[in-house]
Image (tube, rainbow, N blue to C red):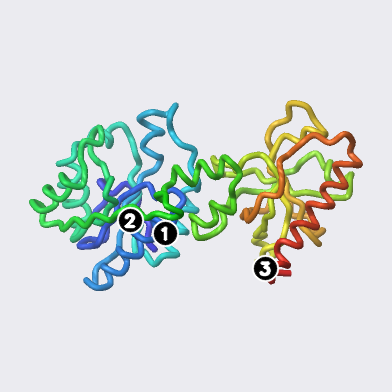
Amino acid sequence: MNVFVDPLRRSDLPRGGVVTIGNFDGVHLGHQEMLRRVVDRARELDAPSVVLTFDPHPMRILHPQRAPRMIQTLRQREEAIAALGVDALVVVPFTREFAAMNAEEFVRDLLGRSLGAREVHVGSAFAFGCGKRGNVTLLSQLGEEAGIRVVPLDVVAEGGEPVSSTRVRTLLEAGSVSEVRRLLGRPFAMEGVIAKGDRMGRKIGYPTINLKSENELYPRDGVYVTKVLLRSFERTFTCVTNIGRRPTVYEDYATTVESYILDFSSDVYGEPIRLTFFERLRDERVFPSMLELTAQIRRDVEATRLWFLSRGEG
């Protein structure tokens, strides 16, 4: 997949394509349905499939105090979109100048002049242009004038509720990573590098890696069944992860993401990793002593091992 940034200033964009527009944060089941339709339709027309997205999230510029924490980094979004067979990702740097563009300019300058779009597929609640004054009806009218066919798609539901990035964020903030896995069609993942910690885990027999994360959104504090991709080993390892402030050891400590990798002893400080979340085991809590904390970690490790064994993974 080719990535193009700042389309209004470029002349090398794929033209005549089937385009879809959105933030696509999380690339959840609803997004995936849209993207598959766009890819399939583009192949029918022998045209490029194009995703038009924005970075940062528009709310970060227009209403920063209300801006959502993003489920994915831009790189994670790119990877998830590419995995669905999309030909091109066009990233609009969202600025106040861009936000001032009215609906007519959006269609004429971006969809028409820059992309030469043949078709535009959007969700039924799609809004665009300055103040989000444009909707699917207006987009269809302006598209007809510009020779662009507009195809709306109804919201995808799961469990009787619409699948949305907001729903995924709410579930993550509640620690419901198994439900998030269902709505994403894959486990939630955090990325970053392994940073040096205080080596407290090593002192009690459970050395951990500390993730310095690039992600904005963390699951709720607690203990999780996870896997970690260590790129230098080119494989994943089973681990148990604690997100929280380690209240048994410290008072008023910053939130950390610490993982104990099962059956592993190599030094991997500074290595880039991807940490994926499968199931929540328990809340983080204060233990009366380090001995009792250690005993609970032992039970967490066993529970994690059994979780994967019960699913045919050793």
Q: Residue at x 73, y 26 (%)?
A: 252
Q: Amino acid at mark 2?
A: Val
Quick check: 170 left or right of 240?
left
Q: Residue furthest front?
A: 160
Name the quadrant of the N terminus: bottom left
Image quadrant assignment for residue 290: top right
- State the residue position of label 2: 51
Is there CB contact under 8 Å for labels 3 and 2? Answer: no
Circle on res. 197: none
Residue at the spot of label 3: 311
Inter-mark Cα distance, 3 to 1: 28 Å
Q: Amino acid at mark 3?
A: Arg
Label 2 environment density (alpha carbons within 10 Å; few <14, some 14–19, many ≥20): many
On screen, residue 192 versus residue 139, left or right, reads right
* Residue 43: x %, y % from top left: 28, 72
Question: Is residue 273 visible to the viewer in this orientation of the structure?
Answer: no
Residue 58 in view in this figure: yes
- What's the CA distance linking mark 3 and mark 2? 36 Å
Residue 81: image tag: 1
Depth check: 288 or 36 in front? 288
Circle 1: element type: helix
Given residues 238 and 224, the one toward you in this image is: 224
- Mark 3 vs 2, N-terminal side: 2
The reply to whether the C-beta atoms of the residues labelled 1 and 2 are less than 8 Å apart is yes
